[in-house]
Amino acid sequence: MPAPLNKYQFDKLGNTLVFFAKNVGDFGKTKALKLLFLLEEKSIKDLGVPFFGFEFKVWQFGPVVGEVYNDLNDRDLPLLSRYIKRVEANTDEFEAVTEFNDDEFSENDIYLMNEIVAFARNKTATDLVNVTHGKNSLWLKAAKENDLIEGFENKTITTTDIIIDFSSLIQDDDYLKERYESSLEYFQFNNLLKA
């Protein structure tokens, strides 16, 4: 079982949510969760390095980091309230409560976030669900490989502990594969130090 997200991970996550809240228009829970996944996916695909190093699990409605999902579902956002809050006029939407702090981010990180913002700015949460559940998506691949589709469709399964395998994004690139494997070791070690 993975360790709970540490302070460094929450600072990076929180500031990423601030960045998205200020730049992507309507920003609800589903859109937030999809953008976090797409950011992680793009970082691995382009650089061979995870953006967060989170374990995204295969759930009925897509790839999810359980702790983040639970926090965004809680009315008071117990873990992320330093960064975002519910919009008073529409409690399904979030807005930033602080300015974006780039202390936790590299130039590559900022570039990737801007790329995701450019991609998602005019998209709805449903549009992003269609991307993360699309026919070539990692979520669909994992759901099929683990015989989850029928259970998801008839709602007998809603969550699983199956982790999305990002390595398939870079399976044909030895350089990116090596970077990815090294970065996973770094994230594991770093998480132990900062836990």
Image: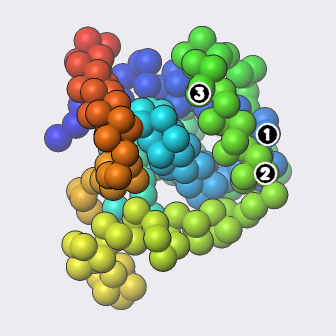
Identify which residue is drawn at 72% across, 52% down. 119
Residue 183 seen in this snapshot = yes
Q: What x and y, as percent, mark residue 134?
A: 52, 73
Q: Is residue 34 left or right of residue 195?
A: right
Label 2 belongs to which residue?
121
> Disc 2 on helix, strand or loop?
loop
Identify which residue is drawn at 73% across, 63% down. 124
Residue type at numbered disc 1:
Asn
Comes first in the chain, label 3 or label 2: 3
Label 3 belongs to which residue?
109
Per the rendering, the mark at residue 23 is 1
Quarter of the image with the N terminus in it: top left
Q: Is residue 179 left or right of residue 44?
A: left
Comes first in the chain, label 1 or label 2: 1
Residue type at numbered disc 3:
Asp
The answer to whether marks 1 and 2 mark residues whose Cβ atoms lie closer than 8 Å is yes
What crowding class fits label 2: few (fewer than 14 Cα within 10 Å), some (14-19), or many (20 or more)?
A: some
Identify which residue is drawn at 23% across, 19% down. 189
